[in-house]
Every structure is written in structure tokens, then in C-alpha cells.
């Protein structure tokens, strides 16, 4: 399989629809869990998508009731396909998942 990246010019009266490879959630979760177990910042490309992992920090987020900044992992492009995991209940608890797939034609 050949994976390519494209920029789609926006037109007011036309929508471009292209095939797109979306990774298996099980594989994404497994990779994110591995990064989380290492506890080190990572940024790169995964399954053809930009992705990033940021470990938990003791720093309190601005304008938040949280007492720490949770670890988080994200992959994708918001508005097309985007998936994230946030360990908002603590690094030893299950992460909260978020999926933005509004760009996927159903």
C-alpha cells in the first residue's frame, strides 16, 4: 500500500472527497500505552498521521480546578480524523478517550 500526504485546496462550491487510511484503535491505544509507560515526551508520525505524547506534570493548568497537568496523547488532524487519550484521573488510571471523526463521510 502506498500512503501519500496531500493538501486539499478549499473551494466555496466544491468538496473534495479522498480515500484516507485510519489506523486501528487497538494499535493506537497500544502505542500510546507504551509511550505512557515510558513517561517521556514524544512527537512524530504514526500510521501516516502526526502524533504527540506529553507526560503528566505537577504543574497546575491555568484556569482549571485540576491540581496537575494530565498526560495526553493525540493523533490526527482536527476536523478530519483526530483521536486523543488523556489520563485526567491520574497516570495509573484509564485514560479518557476523545474522537473527532466529523470529516469522515458516513
Image: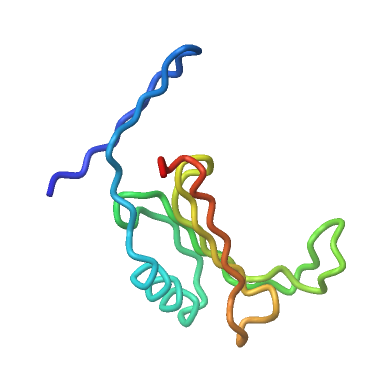
| Residue 89 in the image, given as x and y percentages of width and height | 70, 79
Is 49 situated above or below 33?
above
Taking the image as shown, residue 69 lies to the left or right of residue 93, namely right
Q: Is residue 38 above or below residue 51?
A: below
Specify the farthest residue to the left.
1
Q: In which quarter of the view is residue 17 placed?
A: top left
Side (left or right) of 20 relative to 64: left
In the rendered picture of this protein, how many numbered marks are placed on residues?
A: 0
Q: Is residue 56 left or right of residue 13?
A: right
The answer to whether residue 79 is above or below residue 36 is above
In the image, 35 versus 19, the foreground residue is 19
User: Is the image coloured rainbow, by chain, by secondary structure, or in one colour?
Assistant: rainbow
Q: Nearer the viewer, residue 18 or 63?
A: 18
Quarter of the picture holding the C terminus: top left
- Residue sitting at 58 percent across and 82 percent down? 94
Rendered residue at 68%/71% (across/down): 57
Q: Position of residue 19 (x, y in %)?
A: 27, 39
| Residue 104 figure quarter | top left
Q: Is residue 68 left or right of residue 82?
A: right
When the figure is inspected, residue 38 is found, relative to residue 72, above or below; the finding is below
Residue at the front extreme?
106
Residue 90: x and y in percent read 68, 81
Amino acid at each position: 500500500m502506498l500512503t501519500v500526504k496531500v493538501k486539499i485546496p478549499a473551494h466555496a462550491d466544491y468538496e473534495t472527497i479522498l480515500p484516507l487510511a485510519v489506523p486501528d484503535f487497538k494499535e493506537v491505544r497500544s502505542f500510546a500505552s507504551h509511550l505512557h509507560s515510558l513517561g517521556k515526551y514524544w512527537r512524530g508520525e504514526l500510521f501516516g498521521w502526526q502524533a504527540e505524547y506529553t507526560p503528566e506534570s505537577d504543574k497546575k493548568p491555568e484556569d482549571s480546578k485540576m491540581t496537575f497537568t494530565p498526560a495526553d496523547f493525540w493523533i490526527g488532524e482536527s476536523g478530519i480524523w483526530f483521536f486523543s487519550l488523556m489520563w485526567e484521573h491520574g497516570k495509573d488510571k484509564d485514560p479518557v478517550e476523545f474522537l473527532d471523526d466529523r470529516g469522515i463521510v458516513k
